[in-house]
Image (tube, helix red, strand yellow):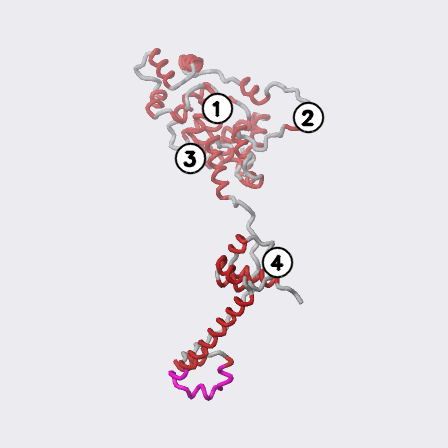
């Protein structure tokens, strides 16, 4: 028992199942672990019961459906669904009333294998209660109608009524499991055989494995095996969708290294007087020509007059320059009409020959910065 318990704590459920399959003493130790004080040991022992591949274990497994720990009940329901023996039908039906979704899901899966037709996970509480109580005050004909109303197939109704008449004390069928595990040999050509991949995830159905295959290998490998074994197609789809949302759509781009300048102490700038502000606004050429001493001696009104006169001179110079360009180059009016004055002043410096290959729509869409770059690139070199 000590060895079995140790292996279960290490989550070596496959090894425990193999040993129990080959050795009666190990089998007894495994069944004893179903009632271990540790819920972790109990849960993993029930998972190992599936790896043992012995349907006769369902009698002891069914008792674990009453365990107070939900994870233990989940493992028990999973094992009963795996073996799907007729004698466990009453236990599986009771499992449909469990508080835990996973327990109900596994029990519904087990019943679907035994009694085809109903979607057992969606059977109402009232109908489940009738099944649990074994149809009180109902005649056989009424029971047949009730089972048919659950959409149970006719042959499944007959099987249920037959098993019920025997009190579900049905001999455990080992051959059915052997057929499932081994199956009939299929002869394949070497080419066909090479295309078949071995199952990548143990203990799950083909449908669940196919859904999980949508995830990258590294994410599949990170998922706990004990949780994977509990997945149904529905829960597997939910899991994949959640994981896909959390996955980055593309590899994050490397951030460019940013040079961090040293923080310098900032001294509080002294507020300028009105006179000093006006002097600063004067062009550098004017300040040099007049001189700092002379400017300091001027009043605010005199400085404003000086600033106003220099501004007028600048405006006049710009106007004269524009007029000269317009007189010299007849394209100016066309450019202003098509692209506006600012763009026209930049385009006028580019020869017609160089502008011929650029569509007008493209020029119209260019911003000033792009256009400046274009004029610099197309400037005739000496």
Circles 3 and 1, Cβ within 8 Å, touching? The answer is no
Tell me the residue that label 3 is attached to.
Answer: 69
Per the picture, the main secondary structure of the magenta-coloured stretch is helix
Q: Nearer the viewer, residue 76 or 364?
A: 364
User: Front-most of 363 and 169?
Assistant: 363
- Local packing at callout 3 (Cα closer than 10 Å; few below 14, some 14-19, many 20+) is some
Look at the numbered disc 2 and give the secondary structure of its residue.
helix
Tell me the residue at 42%/34% (across/down). Answer: 70
Q: Position of residue 297 (x, y in %)?
A: 42, 88
Residue 305: image quadrant is bottom left
Closest to the observer, 213 or 99: 213
Disc 4 residue crowd, few under 14, some 14–19, many 20+, Cα 10 Å = few
Q: Cβ–Cβ below 8 Å for labels 4 and 2?
A: no
Q: Which residue is mark 1?
A: 58
- Give the foreground label among 2 and 3: 2
Q: Does the magenta-highlighted stretch encompass residue 3? A: no
Sequence-earlier tag: 4 or 3:
3
- Tell me the residue that label 4 is attached to: 354
| Nearer mark to the viewer, of 4 and 3 | 4
Q: Which residues are magenta?
A: 286-303
Q: Which quadrant of the rendered structure holds the C terminus?
A: bottom right
Q: CA distance from mark 2 to mark 3?
A: 49 Å
Foreground pick, 188 / 357:
357
Q: How far apart, in angstroms, are the residues tagged by discs 3 and 1? A: 19 Å
Q: Which mark is residue 191?
A: 2
């Amino acid at each position: 028992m000590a060895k079995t318990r140790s292996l279960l704590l290490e989550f070596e459920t496959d090894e425990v199942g193999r040993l129990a399959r080959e050795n009666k003493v190990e089998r007894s130790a495994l069944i004893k672990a179903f009632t271990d004080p540790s819920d972790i040991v109990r849960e993993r022992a029930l998972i190992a019961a599936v790896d043992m591949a012995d349907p006769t274990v369902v009698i002891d497994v069914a008792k674990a459906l009453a365990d107070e720990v939900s994870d233990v009940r989940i493992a028990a329901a999973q094992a009963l669904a795996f073996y799907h023996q007729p004698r466990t039908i009453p236990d599986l039906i009771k499992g449909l009333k469990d508080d835990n979704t996973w327990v109900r899901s596994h029990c519904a899966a087990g019943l679907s294998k035994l009694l085809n037709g109903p979607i057992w996970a969606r059977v109402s509480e009232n109908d489940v209660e009738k099944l649990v109580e074994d149809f009180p005050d109902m005649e056989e004909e009424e029971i047949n109608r009730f089972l048919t109303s659950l959409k149970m197939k006719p042959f499944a109704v007959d099987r249920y009524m037959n098993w019920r008449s025997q009190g579900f004390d049905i001999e455990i069928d080992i051959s059915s499991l052997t057929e499932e595990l081994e199956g009939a040999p299929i002869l394949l050509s070497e080419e066909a055989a090479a295309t078949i991949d071995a199952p990548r995830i143990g203990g799950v159905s083909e449908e669940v494995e196919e859904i999980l295959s949508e995830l990258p290998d590294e994410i599949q490998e990170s998922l706990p095996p004990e949780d994977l074994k509990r997945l149904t197609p529905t829960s597997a789809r939910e899991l994949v969708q959640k994981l896909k949302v959390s996955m980055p759509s593309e590899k994050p781009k490397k951030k460019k290294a940013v040079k961090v300048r040293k923080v310098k102490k900032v001294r509080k700038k002294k507020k300028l007087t009105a006179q000093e502000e006006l002097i600063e606004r004067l062009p550098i050429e004017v300040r040099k020509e007049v001189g700092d001493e002379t400017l300091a001696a001027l009043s605010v009104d005199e400085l404003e007059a000086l600033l106003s006169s220099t501004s007028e001179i600048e405006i006049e110079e710009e106007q004269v320059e524009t007029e000269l360009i317009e007189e010299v180059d007849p394209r100016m009016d066309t450019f202003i009409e098509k692209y506006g004055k600012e763009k026209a002043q930049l385009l006028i410096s580019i020869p017609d020959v160089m502008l011929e290959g650029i569509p007008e729509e493209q020029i119209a869409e260019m911003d000033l910065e792009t256009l400046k770059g274009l004029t610099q690139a197309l400037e005739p070199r000496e």
